[in-house]
Image (spheres, grey):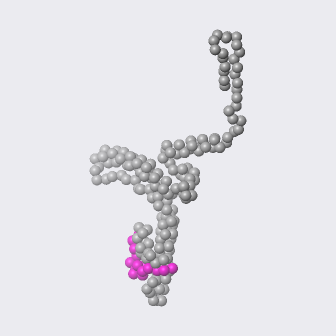
C-alpha cells in the first residue's frame, strides 16, 4: 500500500492509494516446509528422534540414522529421566523408611539389533571363526560341557574330526541349533 501526500498544507488534494499483489502464485511447497519445520521443532523440543514418530530420515550417504538416533535418545533423554525418577523413588521408599542396603534401579534399555547380531554369529560360525560354545557365551548363556561344542567348523563340517566324530558332532549341533533358535526367538521378542 502506498500513500502519497504533497508537502505543505494541501487538505483538499486527493491521496492516491494503490493495492498491488505481491505474488499471484500459491506456493504449496512453502506450506509443506513450514509444516515440516514445526514438526521437527516439536520433536527436537521433546528430544524424540524423527523415526520414533514414523518419519524416515536418511543419512548424508543414503543410509539410515535410526541406530545412532536411538543411542543418542537413550543417553540424552531416557537415562537422565530414569536417573531422576530412581532418585525420587529411592528417597521416598528406602531413605524415608531408613533402609540403607537396598536401592531401586530401572533395567537398562537394550538398543542392540538382535537380528543383525544373530546373522553376524551365524557367519562367524560358518567360516570357522566361532565355536558353538563361543556363540553361547556371546549370547550371554553358559557354554555346554561337551568338547565337540568347543571345536570350530567350516560350513557345518568339523575341522579335525573322523567320520564317527563328525556324526556325533552333527547330532550335538542339531540339538544346539534348536536351543539357539529358541533363545534367539525369546530374546528377539523382548525388544521394541
Residue at left offset 28%, top offset 50%: 100
Residue at left offset 70%, top offset 38%: 25
Question: Which of the pair 17/93 is nearer the observer?
Answer: 17
Q: Name the outermost residue toward the front.
A: 7
Main SS class of the magenta portion in the image: loop
Residue 180 in view in this figure: no
Residue at left offset 55%, top offset 58%: 61
Image coords of residue 83 (percent x, y):
38, 49
Q: Is residue 7 left or right of residue 116?
A: right
Residue at left offset 48%, top offset 56%: 68
What's the magenta region? 141-155
Where, by quadrant of the figure, is residue 150 drawn?
bottom left
Residue 36 in view in this figure: yes
Q: Determine if the magenta segment contains residue 26.
A: no
Question: Which of the pair 111/173 is nearer the observer?
Answer: 111
Q: Is residue 60 above or below residue 45?
A: below
Q: Is residue 44 above or below residue 173?
A: above
Image coords of residue 181 (percent x, y):
50, 71
Question: Which of the pair 113/181 is nearer the observer?
Answer: 113
Q: Is residue 73 left or right of residue 61?
A: left
Q: Determine if the magenta segment contains residue 149.
A: yes
Image coords of residue 8 (percent x, y):
63, 12
Q: Name the outermost residue toward the bottom.
A: 163
Amino acid at each position: 500500500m502506498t500513500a502519497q501526500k504533497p508537502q505543505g498544507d494541501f487538505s483538499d488534494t486527493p491521496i492516491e492509494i494503490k493495492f498491488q499483489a505481491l505474488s499471484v502464485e500459491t506456493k504449496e511447497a512453502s506450506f509443506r516446509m513450514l509444516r515440516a519445520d514445526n514438526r521437527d521443532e516439536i520433536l527436537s523440543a521433546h528430544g524424540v528422534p524423527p523415526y520414533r514418530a514414523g518419519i524416515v530420515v536418511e543419512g548424508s550417504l543414503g543410509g539410515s540414522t535410526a541406530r545412532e538416533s536411538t543411542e543418542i535418545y537413550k543417553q540424552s533423554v531416557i537415562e537422565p529421566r530414569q536417573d531422576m525418577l530412581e532418585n525420587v523413588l529411592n528417597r521416598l521408599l528406602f531413605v524415608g523408611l531408613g533402609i540403607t542396603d537396598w536401592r531401586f534401579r530401572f533395567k537398562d534399555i537394550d538398543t542392540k539389533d538382535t537380528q543383525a547380531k544373530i546373522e553376524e554369529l551365524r557367519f562367524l560360525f560358518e567360516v570357522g571363526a566361532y565355536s558353538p560354545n563361543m556363540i553361547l557365551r556371546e549370547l550371554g548363556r553358559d557354554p555346554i560341557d561337551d568338547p565337540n561344542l568347543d571345536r570350530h567348523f567350516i560350513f557345518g563340517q568339523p575341522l579335525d574330526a573322523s567320520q564317527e566324530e563328525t556324526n556325533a558332532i552333527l547330532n550335538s549341533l542339531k540339538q544346539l541349533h534348536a536351543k539357539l533358535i529358541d533363545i534367539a526367538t525369546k530374546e528377539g521378542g523382548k525388544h521394541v
